[in-house]
Amino acid sequence: MKHFIFILNTLFVYFYSFSQTTKFDYKISYNYRFQEDKKDTNSRRTEETLLFVGKEISYFVSAKKLAIDTILQKETNFISAMGRVNSLPKPKVNFEVVKNRDSKNSYFELVGLSLYKVSSQEIIDWKFEEGTKQIGKYTCKKARTTFAGRNYTAWYSEEIPLSEGPYKFRGLPGLILEMYDDRQEHYFSLLSLEKKTYFLDLTHKQDQIVELKNMQELEQVRANRLENLKSAGFDIKLDPQKEKELKEKMRKKQNHIEML
């Protein structure tokens, strides 16, 4: 029981860890298709993701995750909040990206019971190519880039004057409407675009975050998540074979967007 209460408290602290309102002018919805196991196309999953764009920053997050965050930010009764959260579908995409206009990125990921943050400054090197494509009512142009071990094709529209895109991608003379790597293991496609004012709470409490130096350190955290749960006091009793099978299952779900 104490472990159950600890989990609830940890999740509540995490999801209720925003404290400042930020204004956004656009909400772009993408369908994000990703392949969890590099060797198995049957492990492909899809989830709606959202990109909010403001004057100073943009914010990329799973729609399901934002729904949970919103409940826990507004609901003051802990038991009521957790009851509402438990009734919602659980997000498969457990990371967020905050992008500043100075090319600085803040990547957040919940691994086990801890929220990790990796800060970076990245400028995407785009190569423009011939060709156009119609996506909905928008005429799009083609560009390619290499980022974090993958080669990507992006289709962007200058008809939407936002130098933005999903995840950490940006820097083109128009909004990215579709983007995918060469193996199509990570594929973003536009669902909708709204020009409307949104206010979101995005300032994470620093005392609830474990800051890491780079994504390589985060990869080590992911690989050791079972050991980290044990060290946190969880009584996880598995025979050697079951533990081996669990670790293998977790290992197969490590085909992240950034290859390290």
Image: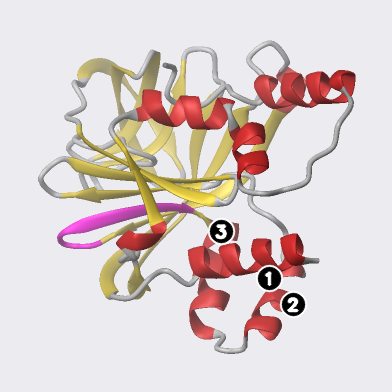
The residue beneath circle 1 is: 85
Left or right of 50? Residue 131 is left
Q: For the residue carrying disc 3, how many other residues have a C-alpha within 10 Å: few (<14), some (14-19), or many (20+)?
A: many
Q: Viewer-proximal residue, 131 or 241?
A: 241
Task: Using residue 68 as the reference point, say whether residue 218 is left or right of it.
Answer: left
Task: Assign the C terminus to one quadrant of the image.
Answer: top left
Q: Quadrant of residue 119?
A: top left
Image coloring type: secondary structure
Residue 168 placement, left or right of 226: left
Task: Tell me the residue that label 2 is attached to.
Answer: 83
Which stretch is magenta?
54-61
Q: Are marks 1 and 2 in contact (CB under 8 Å)?
A: yes
The answer to if 1 sits in the magenta stretch is no
Residue 160 visible within the image:
no
Residue that appears at 59% across and 38% down: 228
Q: Main secondary structure of the magenta part?
A: strand
Does the magenta-highlighted stretch encompass residue 56?
yes
